Amino acid sequence: MPAPDQLIPVLDAFLDGDINAASLDAWCPEKITVQLGGLTIEVLASTAAPTTYVQRLFTPPSELWNVVHPGAPATGVTATMRCLALPRARVAALAEHVRSRCTGAPRHVRMHVGAPATWHQMPGGPVLLTDPDAGIAPQIIARHPGGFTVITCDDTDAAMNTARHLREIGYRLAEDDGWVCLHASAATMEGRGILVVGDSGAGKSTLALALASTPTGAFLSNDRTMITATPGEAPRAVAMPGPIRLNGGTLQALGYASADQWDLTRPQPTNDTDWQSFHGANKLHILPSEWHERTGTPLATTAPVDLIVFPKVIQDSRELHLQTTHPGPAHELLSTQCMSPGDNVYVSDWLDIRTRSADDLTGNGARVLDALCDLPAVSLRFGTRTPYTAVTETLRAALASPASPI
């Protein structure tokens, strides 16, 4: 592939509207095709890192996020996303080119809570730039007829950006189709779905992984779970693709002494951080597909929701207490963790994918929450020193007789 010095004038011409996006295809030898609901996107990349990460992130496939294997039929409207990775200084220089040539009033958005960005109008179309003081790597997303072009830095984190943008598109398309996002993890046990809902630090990931590690368990999702509710059927859960974030204390309690030998997409935190504790801010990031490869834990793609759990993990304790949560309090707890349409991390529809109004999405969210409140729900307090076998057996009993406090 030609050197970056040869690519920069081509990208300048593309951003200025002098050439079309297809002129960049020669610089993108890597290819993967994904289906996001009813939309099919062909991803073209300058290196293998983005396509490899997309493949890992969207494994196992679901009805909302799915890698199309070569030779398989692809249905739906087709779009293209091109991803070009350049040295950071080159990306920053292209961003300054956009700022110096853009016209009209800028429009401010947030790619996530810590990533402010601004849309600028260029002759070739609208271009989104991460703000210079955002504390993240510079990044450029150009929207044009038929798709997007992503210009990103050639480092480990930036290689994940293509997958993040695809996940964002899938997220908003799913909301348009009636799915609702909850701040929740999920697992199955004996084929029955358990939705674990709560604030950050409540123990959602810990509990979902513990349930998945039982002989009849499977892991479904971490931190964000998409829910749909069809009249006459149990609400159903599908994972939003993302890494499992856990600390060393949880890893050891699950029976894994160390992750030192695990070759992960995102390297583990260094030993001089607090990640080895039970409540550290620094955590191991491991994709569900990587967790399956290294632990043998089965992965579920979807599950009906049979039980809702509101956990609270207690540091340095052997406490274990479960009680029924009645529909009124359950609705209040679920409402605070409903991320559609107001996600507290992915705070805005920054690619302008949604077609339904905020009021419509809010009404759909209320409908799905009402359906969830018809299900058994329990509050569970457990300690970091409580054996996980005791915790999972308690929830197994709740599944068998959810109306009775234990």
Image (cartoon, helix red, strand yellow):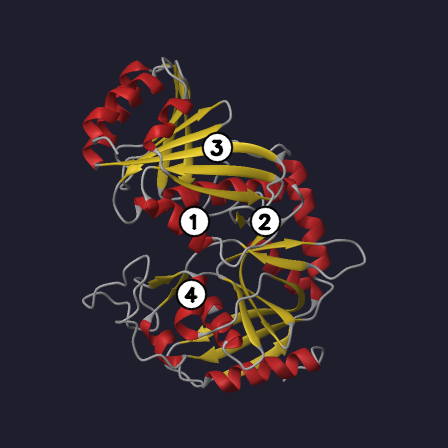
Q: Residues within 10 Å of mark 3 (few under 14, many from 20)?
A: some
In front here: 127 or 16?
16
Q: Which residue is mark 1?
A: 54
- Answer above or below: position of 85 versus 16: below
Q: Which residue is mark 3?
A: 80
User: Label for residue 201?
Assistant: 4
Residue 5: image quadrant is top left
- Answer above or below: position of 130 versus 320: above
Q: Secondary structure at mark 1?
A: helix
Residue 40: image quadrant is top right
Q: Is residue 356 left or right of residue 293?
A: right
The CA distance from mark 4 to mark 3 is 38 Å
Q: Secondary structure at mark 3?
A: strand
Answer yes or no: do the residues labelled 2 and 1 have beta carbons within 8 Å? no
Task: Tell me the amino acid under the disc marked 4.
Answer: Gly
User: Label for residue 199?
Assistant: none
Q: Is residue 402 left or right of residue 384?
A: right
Q: Earlier in the sequence, mark 2 or mark 1?
A: 1
Residue at the spot 39% in from the left edge and 51% down from the top edge: 53
Residue at the spot 57% in from the left edge and 65% down from the top edge: 300
Q: Earlier in the sequence, mark 4 or mark 3?
A: 3
Q: Residues within 10 Å of mark 4 (few under 14, many from 20)?
A: some
Q: Residue furthest front?
A: 71
The CA distance from mark 4 to mark 1 is 27 Å
Q: Earlier in the sequence, mark 4 or mark 1?
A: 1
The CA distance from mark 3 to mark 1 is 14 Å
Q: Earlier in the sequence, mark 2 or mark 3?
A: 2
Q: Quadrant of the C terminus?
A: bottom right
Answer yes or no: do the residues labelled 4 and 1 have beta carbons within 8 Å? no
